[in-house]
Amino acid sequence: MSKKVLIADDSLYMRTMIRNTLEANGYTVVGEAVNGDETIEMALDLEPDIITLDNIFPGMMGIEVAKILKEEELDIKIIMISAVGQEDMINKGKELGVVDYIVKPFSDDVLLASLKKC
């Protein structure tokens, strides 16, 4: 059974790139969210196995989304994706149980290796 993935990124280009990589490798994309609130709502509704979560959103940071989802105690693996590779952000993500932290730009291989960790 293929893993269900929710893609959360405010960039259409990034969502499309991630979707193409996932679908070409047997993952099922169950939705695409463009901001933090939508990500939380879709995560609760769709119950994906994995979320690829951008960290820089208008309104709410991805790290805040990860914190809220952890409080909901959902069994969802999160891969943070961001242009910001600051050590403190990476550490905050790890504290919240984020499986991996990918810094943009990245290759398909990096994304797929990260998904395998889930």
Image: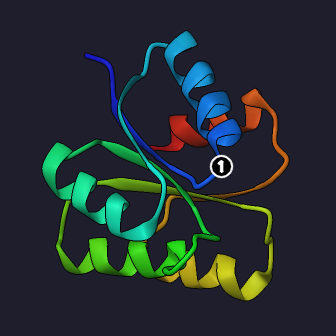
Label 1 amino acid?
Ser
Q: Position of residue 51 (x, y in %)?
A: 42, 49
10, 51: nearer the viewer: 10
Q: Quadrant of the N terminus?
A: top left
Answer few, some or many: residues within 10 Å of disc 1's Cα (few below 14, many 20 plus, some between 14 and 19): some
| Image point (67%, 76%), residue name | 90
Instruction: Write down the quadrant of residue 85 in the picture.
Output: bottom right
In this rendering, does residue 110 appear at all? yes
Q: Residue furthest toward the right?
A: 105
Instruction: Write down the quadrant of residue 29 in the picture.
Output: top left
Q: Position of residue 27 (x, y in %)?
A: 42, 21
Identify the secondary structure beneath mark 1. Answer: loop
| Image point (48%, 66%), residue name | 98
Numbered disc total: 1
Q: Residue furthest toward the bottom?
A: 88
Q: In the image, 82: left or right of 65?
A: right
Which residue matches tag 1?
A: 11
| Image point (26%, 54%), residue name | 43
Q: Position of residue 3 (x, y in %)?
A: 33, 28
In this rendering, does residue 75 appear at all? no
Q: Position of residue 63 (x, y in %)?
A: 51, 77
117, 67: nearer the viewer: 67
Q: Quadrant of the C terminus?
A: top left
Up-down: is 26 above or below 78? above
Chosen colour scheme? rainbow
Q: In the image, 13: left or right of 84?
A: left
| Image point (45%, 13%), residue name | 26
Q: In the image, 82: left or right of 51?
A: right
